Image (cartoon, helix red, strand yellow):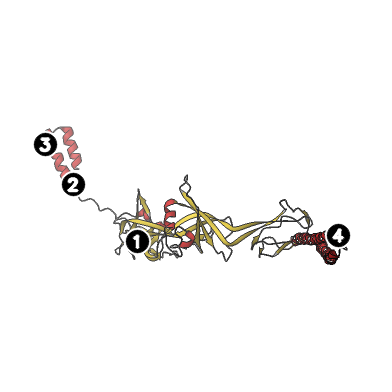
Amino acid sequence: MNRLLLHTLIRSQALPSVALWALAALLAVLGCGKSAPPAAELPAPRVTVANVVQQEVVDSDDYTGRTEASAVVEVRSRVFGYLKSIDFQDGDFVQEGQTLFTIEPDEYRAIHEQSVARIGVNTANLELAKAKLARNKLLLPTRAISQEDYEESVAAVQVAEAAISAARADANRTAVDLKYTEIKAPISGRIDRALVAKGNLLTGGTGPGALLTTIVAEQPMFAYFDVDERSLLGYLGRRGGDAEETPGSLRASQIACYVQLANEQDFPHEGKLDFASAQVNAGTGTAKLRGVFENKDRKLVSGLFVRIRVPVSKPYQALLIPERALATDQNLKFVYVVDDKGHAARRNVELGTPRGDLRIVKSGLSAGETVIVKGLQRVKPGQRVEAETESAAVAAAR
């Protein structure tokens, strides 16, 4: 009604302009005096929180690498012959000295027996030559034989002795050929499939023999990985084991390392660092290191992609929170903490290394506090929230 009256006066010009402006100001003041209806209060957002846990942890460096067998041996034929039998199952774990293949030995056995018999023949010739020499030695002073006949008998003894040596050497050679008709495992390890079927003619001798199979030594198992210069210097500078007597040796320092396979959540395989390459690659600034693992359960297979963890600190108490609690504001990491009155407060945090689904927090939080892990997008600093507690699953940290 006030607005309608004002418009009527203005249109009728019943009042001067100054009076109209004063009347308008008075109406505005009267209008402001009316109280606005109260705004509806928004409900508190529902969030999920987890406790900040304290646990003993060890700082570590993580790398990626490949496993490699400690030895790989190609099993080849050393003699010619037909393959008589295959004495293993494909993929077996074989022991050193175990018979793997048999080549038909009959011909080699006959040749060896012939060479042994030749030793007997030459031995008999030697006895005869010695007997003639002894007789001629008695006859020489009486001039019953000539000096030339006596010297010939001496030479005959020497020739017989040399023939025996040659026969023995030939017998040793044929014995080796006969032994090679049984092909045995040179090392213990996992054997590949047989590459030649029974009945085939195998090559051997002075040239490269036929490849029959391959044996891979899985105990111990190696893991190779690359590290940067700073990490390499840190490892070489450690003191442990016999490192005082052999400085700069990873094997002497007895540095522990752990391996994780692609289907594993933790690092269950423990080993030791035992080798570092003799020089740093100038192009990449890295050096190759090797960890050695006993591999008693034979779960480590050559050629696997693995993660490798090397501890770099002593055990200490650390605070951990779930990774889901972290949020990012440019270059800052922060979390929302819920106090005992149910209000959310922002905390900037300094982070450490991850531990599975958890993350070490170096500063910004205290043990026993609760952080929001679900519903971060609906929360503002100082806002009251309705929190549900989630138990934080803590994985065993190595």
Q: Quadrant of residue 196?
A: bottom right
Q: Residue furthest front?
A: 142
Q: Find residue 19 and name its label.
A: 3
Residue at x 49% of width, y 52% of height = 278
Q: Return the disc, 1 or 4, that comes first in the chain's sequence.
A: 4
Q: Which residue is mark 2?
A: 32
Q: Amino acid at mark 1?
A: Glu
Distance of mark 4 from mark 2, alpha carbons? Answer: 159 Å
- Say what amino acid the circle numbered 2 marks: Cys
Residue beneath disc 1? 386
Kindly report which numbered mark, 2 or 1, lies closer to the viewer in this rendering: 1
Give the CA separation, mark 3 to mark 2.
20 Å
Compare marks 4 and 2 and give the one earlier in the sequence.
Answer: 2
- Ranked by sequence position, the earlier of labels 1 and 3 is 3
How many neighbours does mark 2 have within 10 angstroms: few (below 14), some (14-19), or many (20 or more)? Answer: few
Reply above or below: 348 against 53.
above
Residue tagged 4: 146
Distance, label 1 to label 4, CA atoms, is 129 Å
Q: From mark 2 to mark 1, how far is it between C-alphas?
A: 37 Å
Q: Nearer the viewer, residue 172 or 207?
A: 172
Tag in front: 1 or 3: 1
Q: Residues within 10 Å of mark 1 (few under 14, many from 20)?
A: some
Would residue 276 appear left or right of 329 to someone viewing this image?
right
Q: Quadrant of residue 85?
A: bottom right
Q: Which type of secondary structure does the marked residue at label 1 adopt? A: strand
Type of amino acid at the residue the image marks with label 4: Ser
Residues at badges 4 and 2 in contact (C-beta under 8 Å)? no
Please report whichever mark, 4 or 3, sits nearer to the chain's N-terminal start: 3
